[in-house]
Amino acid sequence: MKYHTEIQRRRTFAIISHPDAGKTTLTEKLLLFGGAIQTAGAVKSNKIKKHATSDFMEIERQRGISVATSVMTFEYQGILINLLDTPGHKDFAEDTYRTLTAVDSVILVVDSVNGVEDQTRRLMEVCRMRDTPVIVFINKMDRDGKNRFDLIEEIEKELSIHLHPLTWPINSGKDFKGVYNLHDKNLRLFTASTKAEEEDTLHLEDLSSPVLDQRLGERDAAILREDVELVDGVHGELNVEDYLAGQVAPVFFGSAVNNFGVKEMLDTFIRIAPIPRSRETSKRVVDVEEDRFSGFIFKIHANLDPKHRDRIAFLRVCSGKFERNKYFHHVRLDKDVRFSNPYSFLARSKDVIEEAYPGDVVGLFDTGNFKIGDTLTEGEDFYFTGIPSFSPEIFKEVVNKDPMKTKQLEKGLMQLTDEGVAQLFTQFGGNKKIIGCVGELQFEVIQYRLLQEYGASVEFRAQPFYKACWITSKDPKKLQEFTRFKSSNIAEDKDGHEVYLAQSEWFLNTERTNNPDIEFHFTSEIH
Ligand code: GDP
């Protein structure tokens, strides 16, 4: 219990959204509240512009920006907030999925005009796998968006989560007049402002107050009274336990670019968002309050600049105290390692730190010792679990163009896949190497890096697969039969686990029906 106070004051979360919903803008406003940045516009968007989809050096430039803003730490009302950034581009979705394993909660931004979009859906699926607590921010209320009730219904239905509005909007678009705070029972009138200042807040004894009619006009006041009666009637008080269990998501309406409705959300966030939690490992649950240090690597960022080939491994501290220059146990390699220049990330600048506590993220210089999912402890052998690999969606065979460089190619493929750039599958006893990615861009990155860093020249040959399913069975014989019978669709992942490569959903469903003893999994634990 040595670090109780430090743990209690930490909140570690990520903002997730479909690109363009307003994640960058919201991030910037939150940092303003935390005093981490003084002026608007300081947070660079790490979003990759559409026209640049084939220009991956541009992507790297953008990724370079994104490493600086990978973790942003700021303080608000005595609470230390670690905000983990996630890449917006869908081709880097796996990076985002893994970052979600390192946070204790998320804020989901939904565009009030577009509602639930592709990435919103996928990211929420990942959150649901871990029952991550979610707060929803419905953004761009200053635009003519969908009807508020329809939007709530759409989000609930599409994302299979119960919503609990904590603020309620008065109109949208040019008629947007503000939000009513259902919890504090006050009305905040809409003013466009980019500064972190108190805005017009109207405290109301109750909604029948004539002040409401004066400020909103009779019609809008009447609508608000009706809405609130309806919403209160359905939802009542928020049950924080339900939120913490990932079953109910509090909802806020606002406009990030106008810094409107953001403070309400932030104030609630620090009140209800989970403190760092205890975590499962391969051996036992590690209590967050344990004195002994433990943590895991959830992301590795490699620098493509040939002059600076260093990698940064991101460590999430799970228990105890991380200390600079202290030896910790690298479980997979069974060796003790120490770090003389661990980084913390105070918005936009990296600082060497002396110590870190549960919930914190530390950047470690890495010369190739780490892979995603690695665990560091004070001596005990266990792995943190719940850091899954997800099925890739594009598969290509690696064709070696330079047989003299076969060794380099092998090494390059191993290291790049350790970093989590892509997944490697081998078929036919190791003869055929297949790379699986979520997006096309990753293939370009791999081709470029294999050549630049390992001198290996490759081409890719498209494979007709759409998903990789990890297969298991209680009956080893059945599994053996299946893999023999379907050998052209069977491969091994890097850890030697068998996967079934499905050509289409139809094939997959057929195999599932025909082989009831075999289980098909879309994710696999890294260990
Ligand atoms: P991201 O891709 O999710 O990071 O989205 P950005 O924060 O970059 O925002 C995308 C665009 O939406 C930018 O042009 C923002 O200025 C704009 N935007 C963000 N918030 C609002 C808002 O509340 N209202 C309006 N009208 N535009 C917004």
Image (cartoon, rainbow, N blue to C red):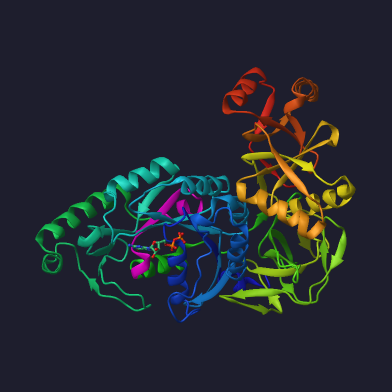
* Residue 362 seen in the current view: yes
Query: Who's the residue at 60% across and 74% down the image?
Result: 5
Percent coordinates x, y for residue 244 in the rendering: 50, 55
* Residue 386 seen in the current view: no
Query: Who's the residue at 84% across and 35% down the image?
Result: 431
Magenta segment boundaries in residue numbering: 239-258
Percent coordinates x, y for residue 281 in the rendering: 72, 52
From the viewer's perspective, tell me whether residue 446 is left or right of residue 165: right
Query: Who's the residue at 26% across and 63% down the image?
Result: 180
Viewer-closest of 313 and 89: 89
Viewer-closest of 270 and 454: 454
From the viewer's perspective, tell me whether residue 157 is left or right of residue 467: left
Within the displayed image, which quadrant is ligand 1 positioned in?
bottom left
Quadrant holding the N terminus: bottom right
Count the labels in the image: 0
Percent coordinates x, y for residue 342 in the rendering: 72, 74
Where is 380 relative to 67, above or below?
A: above
Membership of 243 in magenta stretch: yes
Where is 247 relative to 469, above or below?
A: below
Membership of 273 in magenta stretch: no
- Give the residue furthest to the bottom: 38
Percent coordinates x, y for residue 502 in the rendering: 65, 29
Where is 332 relative to 485, above or below?
A: below
- Give the residue furthest to the front: 401
Viewer-closest of 410 and 482: 410
From the viewer's perspective, tell me whether residue 254 is left or right of residue 209: right
